[in-house]
Amino acid sequence: MPSEENSSHKYTTIRIPKELLDEVDQIIRLRKRGYRNKSEFIIEALRKRVDELTLIPTSNLPVLEHFNIDEQGVRILDRTLSSKTSQGRIIDVYFKPGNVWCDYCQSNNCRHAEFALSLPAVQDILSKKGWNIKT
């Protein structure tokens, strides 16, 4: 792939299916999540995916673990999001009537939301509220 040097950064060109790029264009046009251009969106998406694949814990501890549940939501420790200074990142997943929201992923359909909804204590809370939430 061709590459060029721009100041101290090196860049390369890649091929992306047009249908996928059209979806990115629509996100940018609608100003969802504050993206200003395709490059900004794609670089962030790639960084998130690289983090997911490279920060896999080496211990026998579970990758996702809840440590606090209440009527408003659940706090989850995600050990795949560890860094040099921590053994993971705390993720907040909130419950709303008919919906769940992961503050980290900014989504109602991610692995954190799915994990939260799989917890028996969460299922009990939602059942008592009469909320049927699925990811």
Image: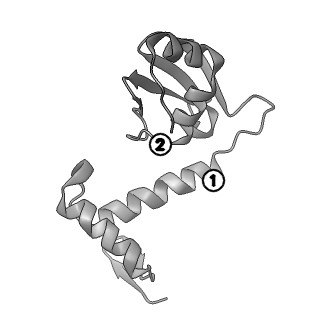
* First-in-chain label (1 vs 2): 1
Residue on which the image places disc 2? 109
Q: How many marks?
A: 2
From this view, report whether residue 96 is shown above or below residue 53: above
Classify residue 73 by image quadrant: top left
Direction from residue 25 to residue 59 in the image, left or right: right
As shown in the figure, which amino acid type bears the numbered disc 1?
A: Leu
Residue on which the image places disc 1? 53
From this view, report whether residue 112 is shown above or below residue 8: above
Q: Residue at x 71, y 39 (%)?
A: 57
Front-most of residues 61 and 108: 108
Direction from residue 23 to residue 109 in the image, left or right: right
Direction from residue 41 to residue 90 in the image, left or right: right
Q: Residue at x 39, y 28 (%)?
A: 98
Point out the frontmost of discs 1 and 2. Answer: 2
Mark 1 burial class by Cα count in 10 Å: few <14, some 14-19, many 20+: few
Direction from residue 37 to residue 100 in the image, left or right: right
Front-most of residues 119 and 44: 119
Front-most of residues 104 and 12: 104
Q: Residue at x 58, y 13 (%)?
A: 124
Q: How is the image coloured?
A: one colour
From this view, report whether residue 85 is shown above or below residue 51: above
- The percent position of residue 16, horizontal first and vertical second, equals 44, 79
Tell me the distance, in whole angstroms, between the alpha carbons under discs 1 and 2.
19 Å
Front-most of residues 12 and 45: 45
As shown in the figure, which amino acid type bears the numbered disc 2?
A: Asn
